[in-house]
Image (cartoon, rainbow, N blue to C red):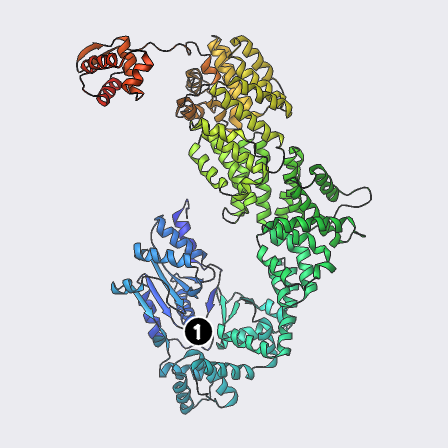
Amino acid sequence: MTSPRPDRAREQFRYPADGTIARPPLTLVTRERLHSALDLGVHSPLTMVVAPPGTGKTVLLSDWVTRRRQSAQPVVWLRGQAPGVLEGVLEWVREGDGPAVTDPIVVDDAHLLPAAVVGEMSRVLQETPHAVRLLLATRYDLLLPVSELEVRGMALTLRSRELRFNDAEAAALVRAHAQDASPADIMLVQEKAAGWAAALVLAARTLQASGDVVWPLGNQGEVLDLLLGETLNTLDKRVQAMLLSTFGATTLSGRLAEVLSGDSEAGSMLADLAGSGLLVTAYADDSASKPLYRYHPLLVELLRRRIAASADDRQLVVSAQHRSALYYENRGDSGSALRSAVDADDAALVERILLGHGPELLAAGKADLVAVGFDALPAGYLDEHPHLLGVRGLLRRVSGDVSGAVLDAAAADERAADRAAATPDDDALEADAALLRLWRSRYGWQDVQEAIAKARSLLTGGHSSPPAVLGPERLAWLLIELAATETWADDLDAALTHLDEALVTARMAGHHRLIAGCLAHQAVVHYARGQVQNAARSAQASFDVGGRESLPEEYSARANVVLGLAAVNELDLDTGWKYHRVVAGTEVAGSDTVVAGLRTMLRAVLLIERGRLGEALTELTADPTAAGPLPSFLSRDLALARAWLAALLGDTSTVGTQVTVLERTGNSTEAGLVRAMTSMISEDAETALKQLDAGLDQPGLYPPLASAAASFRTVLLSRTGDETAAEAALLDTLNRVTPQHMLHALASVADDPVLLDLLRRNATGPNPHPYAAAALEKLSGHRAGWSKAGGMSPLVRVRPGAQAPPPRRLDALVNGVHVRLTAREAEVLDELALGSSYSEIAQALFITENTVKTHLISLYRKLGVDKRSAALRAARSTGLL
């Protein structure tokens, strides 16, 4: 966890994760002995309250926390189901970002914490225990180093025996619920309850209602069942109905209780139950805020048994779940609506929610929930309600059932074509069919242009039908799929337009995953246009909105590969490799043509820059054509990469072949520039400059290639001696490079001192270009691996003197003595450096082995050594090798 302001980050830990703290009941007996123990415990790293349900853990902690807050002592209250703030604290401590977080952190229901959080907590307690103050209420022991800490006096554990009410506390608690209880009654209750909090409360309430408590013989579970059942029966029938209608909700507001029960007094009933401490706990920030309620597990279990045994009670729950589904649907919580509809066992309601909100849930990553909805439908239901075929096809698609998705897509297509009237259900089916049709077309299973045309017609309306009326999530997803297919079909303008529409629609719906999907696809379109920085911003924004871990692979692969290419664009090769490793491990990289093509481009460029030219050649040999022909922008990029690698290797034939590929795929202006940049090998500089000028004047050039060609022109002009023109060309190059930081386009000439000298003069001159210094710094520190591996750019090949080998050095100062090698001794030394044997040296130089040995004896004597390895070291250190 990082933050620019440690104090501000630490401040967030002072507040509860969900804005609520358990509110103690009105019939409260403050237990000072336990408060004192907790006060003492929180001076140590760990305090554990370990006891089964019904022992009063939450009431004790809520009373203690309330007292601390009233005295302005900070405290954090969390629930085990929502450990977000605790995870932040642990990460903060582990990373050492700031001072210790010594405000007590209370975790109720800590047994519900994820195993990963418990493991992290254990590491913190072992490594930096004084950095935290944890108070955990749990039903059982957690895997924490409690014993180690207790030995060191750094942990306190309260168990059931400490939580049991003593006689004085029990008397006060019974009288709080049964004012007329006699001392004998209290003694009997305490004798039977043995200090057990839940049993004391329930027995006291039964005593208040009936004047007697019948204790069964048996274990504590049976005692509690009887007491709770008897107590529940003493409640008003409306209260019982309300409890039966609402106990399925994990957290309950007064308003939701009214909706579920259909009783306008449900909120007041809950407040009364929480105030009396009858296994209902209220949670709120303060006494003035509206509380949320949670039922104790014991009460939930009893209510569950009641509905299992009574058809009438079961019908109450079904009716409540039906109301709940409508309530959540109206609030826009389609996930909760579908769960309630399934619990209500209402097939028609499940169908309606699946049809109206299924794509929304699938796009949000809730495929499992949608699958539960389909499983809840009776056998053969889709035969009579075919509008759901499209949603099921989408479910199968996102779940990886490709064959099932294709079958449903075909069936949805057929049903959509036969529709009789344009009802909302028909529009939904046709949209889902169009969405699946677009998906299939990108994998070669349907005609692309036909799929695009039908989707556009659905969105804009045809000659005889109006545009489809679609929900925002379904519309956004359809627009994203349409744009993805248009990108694949080279209609980048239309793709960007539809992505803009999808982004607006998804933002209106507040659907983060669809927003992220729009941005990830937008990143690819920007990259295809050469707008690499814009592409990187869109890719990063997709992760910022959708979350790096939760974004579907279909979207994250696009964002990762674009970020990798953008890193290479700025010569950050290490980051480029990092993104490549991520995208190479995603399944979509091997099946989606666009992602596979971009991944190939990223890997090939990285291999070339690392000097692994043979591997790059292998990578670029085969087209990533798993899903059909390549879009022209991918054909262009791959042809440019192949042409550049061929130029580095001096393979003019392959360069010519790739120029032909560029022309054939509609990239004739780019073909002209490549021809101009490689013509300098066979033509003079003036001819090459004329071709570069003509090519750079063409409109709509691919920006990275145009920047590279402009840098070539700059170097050639400087070589011709026209420094004024060279300086003007440098400014033109920088103007082309600056907007998208296309430094990789300059890397092809960065090994030529001419460009760096021009950049240095501009950066230190009276009127420097704003990007000159940054470009100089980056390019000066860049050493192309392809150059070290023997690759040679066209500019280097025609550099004056580049073909003439440097004169061989034969003279050197060895151990203070001037020596001179003969030409033959120098040749023997070269062969020796290659690791050749005596016979191999003799064969290479057409001399006998004895002659080789004679030259070696003379060579060793001059270098002052007596063996091969020492001779090679001496020769290298003196410059003879």
Vertical placement of 558 versus 755: above or below? below
- State the residue at coordinates (34%, 71%): 158
**Rendering coords of residue 115 (x, y %):** 42, 59
Can see residue 881?
no
**Rendering coords of residue 288 (x, y %):** 51, 66
**Rendering coords of residue 757 (x, y %):** 42, 16
Can see residue 526?
yes
- State the residue at coordinates (30%, 14%): 842
Would residue 464 be found to the left or right of residue 691 on screen?
Answer: right
Depth check: 658 or 351 in front?
658
Would residue 209 be found to the left or right of residue 115 on screen?
Answer: right
| Mark 1, other Cα within 10 Å: few <14 / some 14–19 / many ≥20 | some
- State the residue at coordinates (47%, 25%): 771
Would residue 9 be found to the left or right of residue 271 on screen?
Answer: left
Vertical placement of 304 versus 129: above or below? below
- Amino acid bearing label 1: Pro
Q: Quadrant of the C terminus?
A: top left
Vertical placement of 388 versus 819: above or below? below
Q: Quadrant of residue 50?
A: bottom left
Q: Quadrant of residue 538?
A: top right
Q: Which residue is mark 1?
A: 53
Query: Regarding mark 1 in the picture, which secondary structure is present there?
Result: loop
Vertical placement of 696 versus 629: above or below? above
The total number of labels drawn is 1
Depth check: 163 or 104 in front?
163
Residue positioned most to the right: 464
Depth check: 279 or 711 in front?
711
